Image (spheres, rainbow, N blue to C red):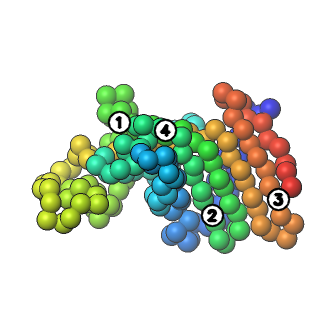
Amino acid sequence: MNKQADWRDRLDSALKGNRRDAYSRYLQLATVGLDGAPRCRTVVFRGFLEESNTLLAITDGRSQKVEEIARDNRAQVHWYFARSREQFRMETRVTMAEPGRQGNLIADVWSRLSEAARDQFFWHPPGEPLESGETLSPTESPPNTFRLMLMEPQKVDYLWLGKRHQRVISVSSGDMWEETQVNP
């Protein structure tokens, strides 16, 4: 058992090695739909919660995934880095940052967004006809529609498709990680 998560070192290395590919920041997030069926969508990785392995992503509070996560916060993240041929599948627990407790974190992530990324939180509700709902007026601070997702990995399945494939499964047990090399 390791306190340090070795998968995190591999992920940091993959992010660094693939950083010139803009799509390396995109990961797939699968949640459990309200009908029990899987739902998968692409989100943008926004960094890690300070001094933790918790991944950050943003979403519109009016999107269906927010309701899905509130009902069942189990999710899976899938991330593939084409340049280095690495895949990370993470079983996670997703929570939404709370303005009262994590307001500074929310404001910090908001401040680092491009203007185009901020603008989408003032559009009509996701999935609704363009004519429905009202368009909000842009503000400097995060609007009520802005949500910061905290994705805390519980299990990480790492696969490297190099010359000699390697696969490592890491499982969290509190703040300790146990890793097992398995046949790819």
Q: Residue at the location (83% across, 43% down)?
A: 180
Q: Is residue 109 visible?
A: no
Q: Which residue is mark 1?
A: 104
Quadrant (top left/top right/bottom left/bottom right) for the C terminus: bottom right
Secondary structure beneath label 2:
strand
Q: Residue furthest front?
A: 35
Query: Pointers 4 and 1 in contact (CB under 8 A)?
Result: no
Tag of residue 73: 4
Q: Residue at the location (14% across, 65% down)?
A: 131
Tag of residue 80: 2
The quadrant in which residue 129 appears is bottom left
Which of pointers 1 and 2 indicates the residue nearer the eye? 2
- Relative vertical location of residue 121 with respect to residue 32 in this rendering, above or below: below
4 or 1: tag closer to the N-terminus: 4
Residue 118 drawn at (x, y percent): 28, 57
The quadrant in which residue 116 appears is bottom left
The quadrant in which residue 153 appears is top right
Which of pointers 4 and 1 indicates the residue nearer the eye? 4
Q: Residue at the location (53% across, 40% down)?
A: 74
Amino acid carrying label 1: it is Asn
Question: How far apart, in angstroms, are the residues tagged by discs 3 and 4?
Answer: 28 Å
Task: From the viewer's perspective, tell me whether residue 179 is left or right of residue 68.
Answer: right
Q: Which residue is mark 3?
A: 184
